[in-house]
Amino acid sequence: MNVRLLINLWIFLCSLGGSIYGFYRFFRPRKALYLKIITGGVSCLMLSSLFLVIYLFTQGKLQQDFHVGMIGQMASFLFLFSANFGQMDGLADDRTDAYKKTRLISFLAPLVIFGLYTVFCLLVNNLALRVSVGLVTIFMLPASYYHFKHIIIYDVKLGIVRQLRLYNVLGLLYAVCTMLQFIGLYADIRPLYIASGIAVGIVAALILPVLKRGVDKWIM
C-alpha cells in the first residue's frame, strides 16, 4: 500500500472541496480581495497534492529532492502571507509602540517552524532534501508570523481580529503540520507522516468555511 499516495489523495480531496467552496462563496461582486487571496492559497495546495497523486499513481515513487509539488506548497504560504500582511495587518496593527510587544512575541511562531526545520536537518542526511524543504520553509516563516500575530494581538474596535482568530489558528496549524509531514516522510516516521497529513487535509477542508463564519460575524 502506497501510504504517500493515500495521504496526498486525502489532502487533494479536502483541498478540492475547500477550493470549490471558496470560489463559490468568495468570487462574487463586492467580496473582499482578502477572501479571494486565501482561496488562492487553498487552491495552490490542491494543485500541489494533485501533482503528487498523479505522479505517485503513474510512477510509484517521487525523487528525493525538489519537485513541482513543493512550488504549490510555497505558493499556498505566499498567498496566506499576502492576505494577512497586505490586506489585514494594517487594520490590526497601527504601528505604534502599543503593539511593539505583540510584534516581538509573534516571532515565536517562525522560531518554532525554524526549530522543526532544524530537527528535519538533523534527522535527514540529504543535502538536496535539506535545500528543497528549506525553500518551502522560507515561505512558511512570514506566513506563520502573521498568523500568530493575528491570534494574540489586541482586538480593534470593529472586532475584525477576534472574529478571524480561529482562521489564523488553522493557518498556523497548516504550517506546523506541513513541517511535521516533511519530518515524518523523509525521516521515515510513518505515524507522524500519516497524522500530520490527515491534519493538513482537515485544515484544507475547514479553513475557508471557518473564514466565512468569522467574516459573517464581523459584518453583522
Image: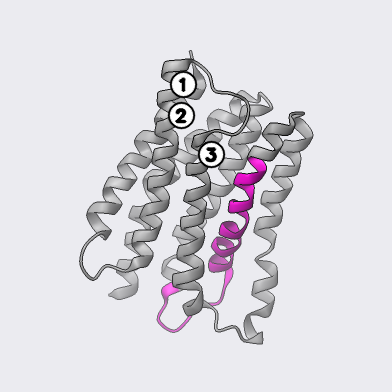
In percent of the image, x 48 and y 63: which residue is there? 82
Residue receiving disc 1:
56
Dominant secondary structure, magenta: helix
Q: Is residue 59 magenta?
A: no
Q: CA distance from mark 2 to mark 3?
A: 10 Å
**Mark 3 near mark 1, Cβ–Cβ under 8 Å?**
no
Q: CA distance from mark 3 to mark 1?
A: 14 Å
**Mark 2 near mark 1, Cβ–Cβ under 8 Å?**
yes
SS assignment at label 3:
helix
Q: Which contiguous range is marked in magenta?
A: 133-160
Q: Earlier in the sequence, mark 2 or mark 3?
A: 2
Residue receiving disc 2:
52
- On screen, residue 40 versus residue 98, left or right, reads left
Q: CA distance from mark 2 to mark 1?
A: 6 Å
Q: Position of residue 64 (x, y in %)?
A: 62, 25
Amino acid type indicated by mark 1: Leu
In percent of the image, x 69 and y 68: which residue is there? 105
Residue receiving disc 3:
70
Residue 77 in view:
yes
